[in-house]
Every structure is written in structure tokens, then in C-alpha cells.
Image: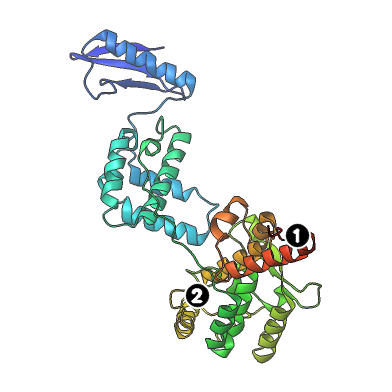
Amino acid sequence: MASIEKRGGVIFARWRDGDGRQRKASRGPDGKPFTSERKARHYAESQEVDVRRGTYVDRSDRTTVSEWAWDWLATRYDVRDATRARIESVIATHVDGTRLGDRRLVDLRPSEIQAWVADRSKVLAPSTLAKVVGRLRQLLAAAVDDGRIPYNPADRVKRPRAPRREKVTPPTVAQVRAIAEAMPPRYRALVIVQAATGLRVGELLALRPRDVDFLSRPPTVTVAAQVDHLTRQRVDWCKSDTSRRTVPLPEPVRDVLAAHLAAFPVDRDAAIFGNGRATGRPVTRHHYNQMLHRACTAVGVPDLTSHMFRHHAGSVLLAEGRPDVDVAEHLGHANTRLVQEVYGHPMPDGKARTLEALERVWSDAAGALRAPAVP
């Protein structure tokens, strides 16, 4: 039961927390000492009301934002190594040693987070800052769930404005072929397979001969793993459940892949696109990007990256009239709403193909059309 206590001229408010432990305080939420028994009793009663509502917060908790961030990450058993490494980098670089990180969790205010965002904006690009703020919001939400703070102060912070998405023009099939021809012979099929399947780079580099079924109709590739770009090891997990999928191979692409394996044979469990050494390990993403940049420069598209082959696959399927759900399944996306937003680019030859479609439709209807009579 709420009560007050006077000792040496100091007024204490007393109450019991959610665990039944006796608590007391000589200061109110404004940090100032109680000046009357009435104010102290009111504060104690409000604390017990919060206990009954399940919104009680222990304001004597000395845990800092930085300490909580590391404690929170330690409980996240469900994150992949690469994701964990990125979160560790965010905490170590942008929380530890800052005024925000040294602030007591229970004292944190939206204005302080807004000031931290303004400070970080001096060294981070808008897109990166948005991700960092998202991580902060996530760990503070966990503090709310744990009863450490009554609300998430990051929810009231003005979010960084995301940069305007630049217009993307995916390569045409002819450009993909030209780029592949400009690659070293061992890695020409790498370009063709990625453009046809739309696999993520990590998924592509993790492919093994056992993942390819040349005899099925249609031929298929099973995606069930990827290469971690930090450890460079093949790991048996994908970005999401929908990333685990079976992707059909067009027969011309099947022939390219079969020819590649005939020219550069590897064991069934080794990487199809290996580094050419006895280890059987896949070529690194960095080396692939270096070779690709040289090839793209040679054919006149120096700004093209490997991720554009994924855009190529999605855009081609949409241009051919495939439903969003089919495109999402092919690319391993859980959210079909992203398909049009991310891959709905006009192809370089889109106007010509649109004209062909219109001419085909109107040619079929030509017999029913009559030219207007000349007066």
C-alpha cells in the first residue's frame, strides 16, 4: 500500500513494485525533491496504479542505452551472423561513447534522440541513417516490452527522409550476352545464370552441381543456401522462408550451365562457380564484382552492377505479362507488393515491344475497320 516516510527533513514516497518489493523515492518525475506529504503520497499512489496497469517502470534503474543495446543483441539468437555483425557495428560506432549511449535508459527523451539523429546525419548518408535509426527504434521497442521504459521515445522522432529512388534501367538480353562474352571464360556462365534466374549474388555463389536438375522438365535450380559475404562460407540458410525455392532454367541457359560444368568440372558438393583452386570454395563477391566491372566497362555500361541482373530477371518477367505473385516466387520475395515497385522498370526496348504488341492487336482487327468515306 502506498505510504510516505519522513526522515531528517526529507519526505519519501513508498510503494511496492510488480515483484512485491518495497520501493521508495525522495524525488518526483521532474527530478525535484518532494515539498509536501501530499505530493509524495500522490506519487506513490501513481506508482502503484502503474503496477496494476502493467506500465510500471523502475526509475532507479541505472542501465544506459549502450548497455541495454548490447544486452538486447545478446538475446537475439534468431539473427544471422552477417546481420549480427552489422548490428554490432551500429552499436559500437553510433551508440557507444556518444551522449545518447551514456544516457540512462529511463531518462531518455525524444528530443535527445532527435539531437543524436542530427549529429549522425553529418557522417551518414540518408539511407544509412534511416537504417541506423531503425535499429535504435527496434532495441528501444524491446525495452518497452521488457518494462524498462513506458514508451518508445524513438517513435516520436522525425525520421530521416529516404533518398529518392534513382531510375533503374536493367540491361537487355543482348547486353547481358555481351557482358558475359567480355568475362573470363570461367565466369561467363555466372552472368548468364544470374540474369536468367534472378538469384541474389550469395545464392548464386552457393550453387553446387547437386542443386541443378538437368533432367527435369523444365530443368531447375534449387536455392537452399547462400554464401555469407563476411565469412565467405556456404551456409544453409536463406534470407527468408520464401527464399528457399526451385527456379526453372530456360533450356538455352541449361545448355550454357552444362557446358560450363563440362569445361570446369567440380565435385557434386563443390561450388559451381569456384575460384579455380583445389579448395572448391566459391569465387568471392569482391572478385566477381571486379571482373564484372571490367566487362561492363568494355561493353559500354560501366555503372552496371551484379544486382542489375536481378532487376533484369524481374523486369523481363513483368514485361512478358507474368503475374506479380509468379515474379515474387521466382525471385524469392515474400512481399508481392514490392515486385512492381522494385522491378517495374521500362526496358530499354520497351517502346518498340509496346508498338509491336499494338500493331499485332490492330492488325488482327484490321478487317473490321473501314476508312472514313471521303466526302
Q: Which residue is mark 1?
A: 369
Q: Nearer the viewer, residue 286 or 375?
A: 375
The number of callouts visible is 2
Q: Residue furthest left?
A: 9
Q: Nearer the viewer, residue 116 or 219?
A: 219
On the image, the x and y values in percent for residue 172 come to: 57, 74
Residue 278 shows up from this direction: no
On the image, the x and y values in percent for residue 355 come to: 63, 67
Q: Tell which tag, 1 or 2, sits nearer the viewer.
A: 1
Q: Amino acid at mark 1?
A: Leu
Tell which circle, 1 or 2, labels the residue nearer the N-terminal end.
Answer: 2
Side (left or right) of 255 relative to 125: right
Q: What kind of element bears circle 2? A: helix
| Residue 32 versus residue 223 in the image, above or below | above
Residue 269 shows up from this direction: yes
Q: Quadrant of the N terminus?
A: top left
Q: What kind of element bears circle 1? A: loop
